[in-house]
Image (cartoon, rainbow, N blue to C red):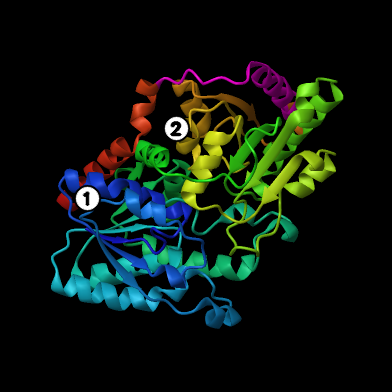
Amino acid sequence: MLIISPNFPPVNAADMHRVRQSLKYFHEMGWQTTVVAVEPAFVEMSVDPVLLKTLPDNAEIIRIKAWEASKTRKFGLGNIGYRSLKSYYLTGNKLLRTNKYDLIYFSTTAFPVMILGRIWKKKFGIPYIIDMQDPWRNDFYLDKPKNEQPPKFWMAYRMDKYMEAFAMKKVDGIISVSAGYPKTLMERYENISPEMCRVIPFGGASIDFEILDKIELKNHLFNHSDGNIHLVYIGRGGHDMNLAVSSIFWGLKKGLESGNDIFSKIRMFFVGTSYAADGKGIKTIEPIAEKYGVGHLVSEITDRLPYFEAMKVLKDADLLIIPGSTDTNYTASKLYPYILANKPLLAVFNENSSVVEILQKTNAGECVTFMNDDSPEVCGQHVYSMLAALLSKLPFTPDTNWAEFEPYSAREASKKQVEFFNKIIER
């Protein structure tokens, strides 16, 4: 199998975890793999060298170059998918011409490279699978005000619309983190059928915490022994999380007004909230905290922490919080590390999110649910009640049902992928 994953260790990116966690099991389950990734120097993301320790020794990884972002951004092309497209085309041609591959697997959110699947399929007759971790053509922002749309939305939307159609009309299989993505694709493209799709969320990699226990890392975010209660969220922000974040801050404000002194000891940290390059992210969390009068208790760091430093922060936290999106297809890919951190956990998610069911099954944390037309006050009242109950029990370890968590492990996620790979090539 030829795997296309532009962002790959030591690059610290969310979209590389599927392949990173699966490589070991792919080999154990009979699939030899070649990963083609972009050289870290050409990727505008931080790196974490410890991530390399999680890869199997026999992993075959080919690194390619890309156009410099400083040169392409003047044309509006900063995405690594565009910048690496030519190198991927040339490298892929060489590999597919000289080696025997049964399958091509695109696992990335650098969507432009996915158009190569159709090109290579026509040229070499090899089927390809696309892993949809996020929406490619994203209609979610079409009816949103301009200030809530991502930068250059309309230009990017039109390019995504054309390129997605090109890639999807000949695709052989779709793997997705959410049932909503295949449903949307089946509505758009008549060639995509239910048997071509599999919903496989990211797995939880316990090896990450095993490695964390063996290395010495310092938490630079807060002093675990400063007498405060540290609540931590590590993950993206964005306007689609405004309802959940507003509800959290409404609940915090209510706690402060209640006279319960424990709320005044809270310090909230929101880390890695932007996908932008380090130092260029725009804060989306702190302005909401200021609106609710709790800004003095909230810190937002838009830059991403190195992966294992982020895991260290999760382990040092007193309570973990996860705000969810009003996009019902959204699933928090970092949910499993939160569970594996084995710390008290409070999630605030749309009632239709898969996160709700997972937390109920595993008993790994509490979840406040909302409907998209709820007000922050309605949801915030539930947040306040749940937060007060959790704070009163600190410190404690969740009574997680690890047997129920096993289906969400990296091994099981890899097994489901392999079963799907076999089905696609047999067909």
- List x then y, in percent, for residue 139: 58, 55
- Residue 367 visible, this angle: yes
Specify the label residue 70 is tagged with: none
Image point (69%, 24%), residue name: 387
Image point (63%, 41%), residue name: 326
Magenta-drawn segment: 379-401
- List x then y, in percent, for residue 405: 39, 27
Residue linked to disc 2: 340
- State which quadrant residue 371 falls in: top right
- List x then y, in percent, for residue 258: 84, 21
Is residue 394 in the magenta section? yes
Q: CA distance from mark 1 to mark 2?
A: 32 Å
Label 2: how many Cα within 10 Å (few below 14, some 14–19, many 20+):
many
Image point (28%, 44%), residue name: 417
Residue linked to disc 1: 424
* Front residue of this view, candidates 379 and 414: 414
Instruction: Indicate the amino acid at tag 1.
Output: Ile
**Rendered position, 273 above or below 201:** below
Q: How many marks?
A: 2
Instruction: Indicate the amino acid at tag 2.
Output: Leu
- State which quadrant residue 296 falls in: top right
